[in-house]
Amino acid sequence: GDSLIGTSRSDPMLPNLEAATVQGLEDDLKIIVKRLTGPLSALDIVTISGMGGIGKTTLARKAYDHLTIRYHFDLHIWVTISQEFRFRTVLLHALHCISKHTNIFNANDYDKMKDSELADLVQKKLKGRRYLVVEYFPSSRILLTTRETAVAMYVDSTSPHHMNLLNLENSWKLLRDNVFGPENDHPHELEKIGKEIVEKCKGLPLTILVIAGYLSKMARTLETWKDVVRILGEIIASHPDKCLG
C-alpha cells in the first residue's frame, strides 16, 4: 500500500484556521491533490511554503482530509513539529498512528525504547507499505509545510508550492463569511468599509480572521467598522514591520 505523511510546524500563539471558512484555496488544493496522487515512480516530497498566517497548515489539512487522498493512500500520518522539536516525540506519534492502522498498540513498550530502536521499529512497520522516507518506495508521498523558502527548495527543489496572499475579493469574502455566516446576510452599506478593512490586512488570512472574530462580537454598524479602519491604520503606522508575519 501507499503512505502519506503530513507535517507542519505549530505555533501555539496563532489561532487555528482549519475550522474557519477560508476563501481562495480551491486552486491551491487542486494542485496539491494532483501532485500527491500523480503517477510519479520516484521519491516525491511536496512542500507548501509561504509567510506565517497565510494558510499553509489549513491547505495541508484540507489535502490530507480530501476524499481522493483518503482513497489513494492506505496509511496517513500527521505530525506537528513545534518550535521545541523533539525527534523522539515525532517517532512516538508516528508509531501510534501506524498502530491504529494495523490494530496493534504497544504504547508502554514504545515509551521504554531508545530513539534508535524507535526509528528501527518505524522502518520495519512501514517497509512493506513502501514508506517514502525510510525505503524510498515509489508512490508514497510526504507533504511538508514551511515558512522558509530555503527549506522548501532544499526538500523540493523542482517545484515547491508557494502560497500567495488573498486578493481583495477573496479577502472580503473571508471577512464577510466569518462575521455574518455563509448565508451572506450582511448590510450592504458595510461592504465598502469592509473592503477597506481587509485591504489593510494585506491579503493575510490569519489577520483577516482575527479582525473577523473581533467584528463578530461588536455592533454591526458603519460607525463601529469605521473605528476598526482607524485603529488598523494607527497600528500599521506605528508598527509597519510587524503587521505581516
Image (cartoon, rainbow, N blue to C red):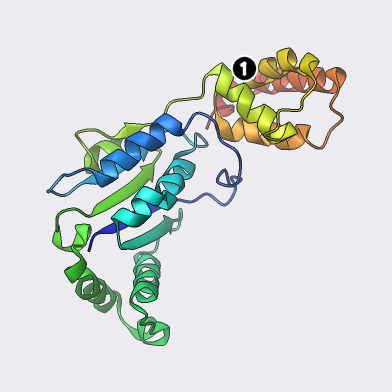
**On the image, numbered disc 1 is attached to which residue?**
199
Residue 4 horizontal side relative to residue 221, left or right: left
Is any atom of residue 202 visible in this view? Answer: no
Q: In this view, does 96 lie above or below 38?
A: below
Give the residue at x 86% y 18%: 223
Tell me residue 119's x, y (percent). 25, 72
Tell me residue 198's x, y (percent). 64, 21
Residue 147 falls in image quadrant? top left
Q: In this view, does 167 lie above or below 77?
A: above
Tell me residue 65's x, y (percent). 44, 52
Residue 27 horizontal side relative to residue 178, left or right: left
Tag 1: amino acid: Glu
Q: In this view, does 183 lie above or below 66?
A: above
Q: In this view, does 118 lie above or below 4?
A: below
Residue 37 horizontal side relative to residue 80, left or right: left
Give the residue at x 36% y 76%: 99
**Count of labels in the image:** 1
Look at the numbered disc 1 and give the secondary structure of its residue: helix
Give the residue at x 41% y 86%: 108
Give the residue at x 30% y 80%: 114
Tell me residue 175's x, y (percent). 66, 28
Crowding at mark 1 (Cα within 10 Å: few <14, some 14-19, many 20+): some
Residue 236 falls in image quadrant? top right
Is any atom of residue 191 visible in this view? Answer: yes
Residue 187 falls in image quadrant? top right
Q: Which of 242 and 106 is in front in this view?
A: 106
Instruction: State which quarter of the image contains the N terminus.
Output: bottom left
